[in-house]
Every structure is written in C-alpha cells, then in structure tokens.
C-alpha cells in the first residue's frame, strides 16, 4: 500500500471534518438537544458549515419542537447575508433554511413572520427556478392565506403574476392584470 501524500492527507481531513458535521446533524435530528451548544461552537469555528448547519438545526427544532429563538437571533445577520450567495449549492441551502424557518414560525403560530418567510422563499425559488420548492411554497401559502395580511397577499399575487409574465404566449394586459 502506498502512503498518502499531502493531498491525500488533506482529503482524509476533509472527510473527517464532513463526518463530524454530519454526525452533529444526525444526532440533533434524533433529538439530542444537549449537543446544540457544542455544534453552535463548531459552526462559529467553521464558517463554511454555518449555512448547512443552520438548516440542520432548524430542521431538528421543527422535528423536536425546540425553541431556538435565541440562536436565530444570534445568527440573524448571517441569515441575511446568505440570501446574497450566488453559487448553486449555497442557494439551495438558503432556500432550505428559509423553508425551515417558515415551518418553525408556523408551528409557533407566528403567522405573519412565517408567511413573510414563505414569500421570501417563493421569490427566491422563482429566481433560481426551483420548481418543486415553488409548488410546495404555493401550497403552504394557500393553506395559511386567511392569516396573511393584505400586504402579504399583494406580494404573493405579484410573485405569481411575475411568473406568468415570464411565460411565453401569455399576455396579461388582455385580462387587466398588471405586473410591476
């Protein structure tokens, strides 16, 4: 057997790192909340894992009915920054995070906050052509439509009309529907 060169050792360390991150996520998803402070410290020490880590934490909170308001407040600035990421992998993670945040706030009966996340996610999923997510978000918004503010309903309609506007062969002007 040939010993590993520098590149091989780096690759082993990368897999070791990913395994540790994945183990934290699996443990949290299975209900081990006591690991949360250690995982949060891990995320602070490893910025590149912050976005996927927050997805896992929020999903675990939703599955296990945990209150993570303090944690979300601590990472609020980071969450805003994630929206500006342009590479495909981070955009997918961002979409997953916003979807989990919507679910989190729906479970807490914070409908206005949740519907704002749904709208943000709808807007984002439309821009990255995430059709499956878009359909799920439309269904989620429609389920809670009666709890939406007039402003949220207007924003929702605007997002949907923009989608129609982008379709070839549909002239919204003939129906009195304007798209801004």
Image (cartoon, grey):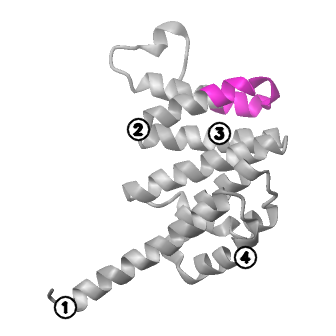
Res 165 → quadrant: top left
Q: Are marks 4 and 3 in contact (CB under 8 Å)?
A: no
Q: Which residues are magenta?
A: 139-155
Q: Earlier in the sequence, mark 4 or mark 3?
A: 4
Q: Are marks 3 and 1 in contact (CB under 8 Å)?
A: no
The residue carrying mark 4 is 37
- Say which residue appears at 59% left-offset and 53% top-offset: 97
Secondary element under disc 2, as helix, strand or loop, is loop
Secondary element under disc 1, as helix, strand or loop, is loop
| Tag nearer the camera, 4 or 1 | 1
Residue 160 in view here: yes
**Total marks in image:** 4
- Which one is in front, 35 or 168? 35
Q: Earlier in the sequence, mark 2 or mark 1?
A: 1
| Tag nearer the camera, 2 or 1 | 1
Q: Is residue 169 above or below residue 52?
A: above
Secondary element under disc 3, as helix, strand or loop, is helix
Q: Earlier in the sequence, mark 2 or mark 4?
A: 4
Q: Are marks 4 and 1 in contact (CB under 8 Å)?
A: no
- The image shows residue 177 at horizontal and vertical percentages of 55, 16
Q: Earlier in the sequence, mark 3 or mark 2?
A: 3
Magenta includes 148? yes
- Mark number displayed over residue 118: 3
- Which one is in front, 116 or 137? 137
- State the CA–CA distance, disc 2 to disc 1: 45 Å
- Say which residue appears at 45% left-offset and 59% top-offset: 90
Res 76 → quadrant: bottom right
- State the CA–CA distance, disc 3 to disc 1: 51 Å
The residue carrying mark 2 is 129
Q: Residues within 10 Å of mark 2 (few under 14, many from 20)?
A: few
Image quadrant for the C terminus? top right
- Mark number displayed over residue 3: 1
């Amino acid at each position: 057997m040939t010993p590993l060169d520098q590149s091989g050792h780096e690759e082993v360390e990368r897999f070791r790192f990913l395994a540790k991150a994945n183990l934290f996520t699996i443990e949290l998803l299975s209900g081990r909340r006591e690991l949360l402070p250690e995982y949060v410290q891990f995320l602070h020490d490893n910025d590149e894992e912050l976005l996927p880590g927050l997805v896992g934490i929020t999903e675990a909170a939703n599955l296990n009915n945990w209150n993570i308001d303090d944690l979300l407040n601590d990472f609020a600035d980071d969450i805003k920054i994630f929206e500006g990421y342009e590479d495909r992998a981070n955009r997918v993670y961002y979409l997953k995070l916003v979807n989990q945040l919507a679910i989190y706030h729906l479970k807490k009966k914070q409908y206005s906050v949740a519907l704002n996340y749904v709208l943000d996610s709808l807007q984002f999923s439309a821009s990255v052509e995430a059709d499956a997510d878009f359909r799920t978000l439309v269904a989620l918004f429609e389920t809670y439509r009666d709890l939406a503010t007039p402003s949220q309903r207007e924003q929702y309609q605007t997002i949907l009309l923009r989608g129609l506007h982008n379709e070839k062969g549909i002239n919204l002007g003939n129906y009195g529907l304007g798209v801004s």
